[in-house]
Image (cartoon, rainbow, N blue to C red):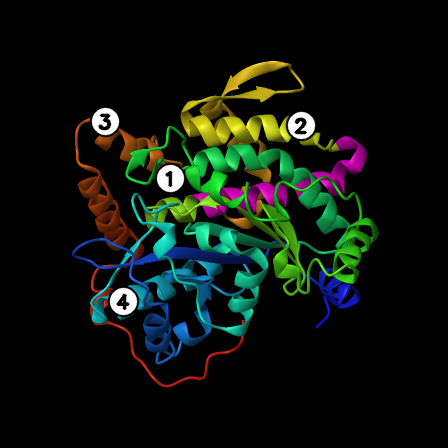
Amino acid sequence: MTLDLDGARERFEASTDFTVGLEEEFAILDPETLELAHRYEDVKAACDEDEVLAEAAAGELIASEIEIRSGRGETFGDAVAAQQERRDRLFAVVERLGLALGAMGTHPWANYLDQRIIDTPHYNRLREELGYIAQRNNTWSLHVHVGVRGADRAIAVCDRVRGLLPALLAASANSPFLDRRDSGLATVRTEIFTRTFPRCGVPSPFVDWDTYAGFVDLLERTNSVVESTQLWWSVRPHHSFGTVEVRICDAQTRGDEATALAGLIVACVAQIALDLDECGAEGCPVMADREVEENLWRAIRYGAGGKMIDFRAEEEIETRALFERLLEWTEPARSGIGIDITLPERNGTERARAAFEDGLPLEDVYRGVVGETARTYARVGAAEAPARRKSRPSER
């Protein structure tokens, strides 16, 4: 097995700007108890009977999770439409199996010690390599791929997306609960995943493809990685797709909010690429690691309701005011590629925490989350739908 860095570079050189791919992760649940149901194999087998889901549904390490992927959309609208069809089909399949899906960054009370890893050679190898870390990772997130033409240009975009990751994380915050407690954090998922997995969190700037490839090649030659998907950074160049992949966000309880957040991510990546084309690297400064990390902690702790540091102005700014700045800055890209975004007044963490602080039992808070997920991801009547046929799933 090899990372084929030369092939990856060629894919970026041939990539198309601002194609979009969406990946959404869901917890598989018992609808009565809301406990995690370790039924991935059953869900995947049922998905493989569906002409669309056979290609779109995938596993992600743990047996209580299912992911759906839009595939490549030539535009954001294409990707959203494709993902909506996949949502409808997945929720219909899960309902037929007598299960439910939840969309939150963490499960409020599931014990990671009860977690089961999917039994495949790939995931068994990860379990052997990661040990406790693989067992601990019962978390769910949203990933967005954006096509960027040119290998050096893609690395330059990744370098600059780093500075936006705290704001995107704060907007997405949707995991306040863990171990039947309010964690005090806006996104405890981030502490579980990005602070424990190796080669995770926010990478340092690489500047160009040769520097990036040299480092990854060293990791391969020194037996740290055998495939590029072991680079779990919060933003990374995806070798197979020729995309910049943003991986920082919590899973979103509401389908419309997942779509809006994905649109903001696509707009940010596209605007950075356009700014680089117009102003060059000198005109688009890169944030220092320590600056990104400071704001990342604020996003983890306080989410959308906190403040971040404007390091250029050397002052604090309300995080929601930063969202407005992002919308204003990305207006040219959004206009050019047809993205209209409405961010919610309160995100998932804020709504769930407010309900809990008002005295609603945690189980009822989460039941409300699961109900919102069912109502807002799948269109009305989707459970009665889609046509099925035997189709051989492709290897993802």
Is 150 rendered above or below residue 1? above
> Is residue 267 on the magenta stretch?
yes
Residue 289, numbered label: none
Q: Quadrant of the N terminus?
A: bottom right
Q: Nearer the viewer, residue 189 or 75?
A: 189
Q: Looking at the image, tell me whether mark 2 or mark 4 is earlier in sequence order.
A: 4
Name the amino acid, label 1: Ser
Indicate left or right for 86 with 223 as reference.
left
CA–CA distance in space, label 1 to label 2 = 24 Å
- Kindly identify which residue carries mark 2: 290
Judge the density around disc 1: few (<14), some (14-19), many (≥20) Cα neighbours within 10 Å. many
Q: Looking at the image, tell me whether mark 4 or mark 1 is earlier in sequence order.
A: 4
> Is residue 276 on the magenta stretch?
yes
Tag count: 4
- Kindly identify which residue carries mark 1: 175
Q: Secondary structure at mark 3?
A: helix
Q: Looking at the image, tell me whether mark 2 or mark 3 is earlier in sequence order.
A: 2
Q: Looking at the image, tell me whether mark 3 or mark 4 is earlier in sequence order.
A: 4
Foreground tag (3 vs 4):
3
Horizontal and vertical percent for residue 320?
A: 45, 25
Judge the density around disc 3: few (<14), some (14-19), many (≥20) Cα neighbours within 10 Å. few
- Kindly identify which residue carries mark 4: 94
Region of the chain picked out in magenta, as a range: 261-283
User: Residue 101's quadrant in the figure?
Assistant: bottom left
Q: Nearer the viewer, residue 328 or 107?
A: 107
Name the amino acid, label 4: Val
Judge the density around disc 2: few (<14), some (14-19), many (≥20) Cα neighbours within 10 Å. few
Name the amino acid, label 2: Arg
Q: Is residue 360 visible?
A: yes
Is 179 rendered above or below residue 356? below
